Image (tube, helix red, strand yellow):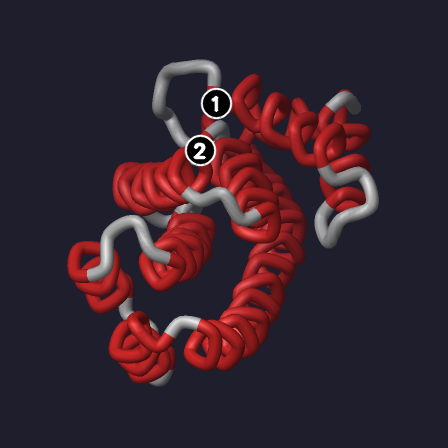
């Protein structure tokens, strides 16, 4: 009887902790999805302006607008390959990164290996935009995305300094765009990452199976 009672208490404790983890992760996933929506809206405005100022990319923006209706990463990757180095490719890269980031965050609790793969794809897309695009708006968005992706990666079992990379990216956003769209969010997240509770959360997330 005592053993059954002890097992019941352990099960309840695990259930309580898992509920707390899910509750902690879910707000960030919702924010990521909200950011994706903002990026899509800005991208639509950018496509409208660009199509009128540079007719040579009209086909690319037409294709981009069609892909927005379905939004699969593979279709965005095709745009990147077809229009390399253009604003079309850079916007496609940012949005593909957002999709992979959202997918990776959703899978951290169910499959750390799959989550790590999706999050690394997000990192790769953001890094490409950061290195290639001269547009401040795109660079700010890519670096903020990098910070979120590296932070999420620190919750998987991948070895490496992902949390340090996340902090560096957040600091870059705060330094370069303190009054930008993500400056306040990045500053607030930097403060939260310094707390014991946040560190403890990610330690538990890494250990959770």
In this rendering, does residue 168 appear at all?
yes
**Residue 168 at x, y percent in the picture:** 61, 22
Q: Residue 101 or 110: which is nearer the viewer?
A: 101
Find residue 153 and name its label. Answer: 2
Q: Who's the residue at 41% across and 32% down the image? A: 156
Secondary structure beneath dot 2 equals helix
Q: Who's the residue at 79% across and 35% down the image? A: 187
Q: Who's the residue at 49% across and 32% down the image? A: 150
* Number of numbered discs on residues: 2
**Residue 19 at x, y percent in the picture:** 61, 52
Q: Which residue is mark 1?
A: 162
Secondary structure beneath dot 1 equals helix
Residue 177 located left or right of residue 167: right
In this rendering, does residue 70 appear at all?
no
Q: Who's the residue at 32% across and 78% down the image? A: 58
Residue 10 located left or right of residue 101: right
Q: Marks 2 and 1: CB-CB under 8 Å?
A: yes
């Amino acid at each position: 009887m005592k053993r059954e009672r002890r097992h019941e208490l352990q099960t309840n404790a695990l259930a309580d902790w898992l509920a707390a983890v899910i509750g902690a992760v879910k707000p960030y996933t919702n924010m990521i999805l909200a950011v994706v929506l903002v990026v899509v809206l800005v991208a639509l405005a950018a496509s409208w302006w660009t199509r009128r100022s540079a007719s040579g990319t009209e086909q690319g923006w037409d294709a981009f607008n069609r892909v927005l209706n379905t939004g699969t990463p593979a279709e965005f990757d095709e745009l990147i390959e077809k229009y390399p180095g253009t604003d079309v490719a850079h916007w496609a890269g940012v949005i593909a990164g957002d999709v992979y980031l959202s997918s990776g965050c959703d899978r951290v609790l169910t499959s750390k290996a799959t989550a790590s793969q999706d999050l690394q794809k997000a990192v790769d897309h953001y890094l490409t935009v950061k290195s290639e695009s001269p547009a401040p708006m795109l660079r700010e968005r890519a670096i903020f995305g990098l910070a979120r992706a590296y932070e999420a990666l620190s919750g998987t079992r991948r070895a490496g300094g992902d949390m340090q990379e996340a902090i560096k990216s957040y600091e870059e956003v705060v330094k370069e765009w303190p009054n930008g769209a993500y400056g306040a969010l990045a500053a607030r997240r930097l403060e939260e990452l310094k707390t014991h509770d946040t560190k403890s959360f990610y330690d538990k997330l890494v250990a959770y199976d």
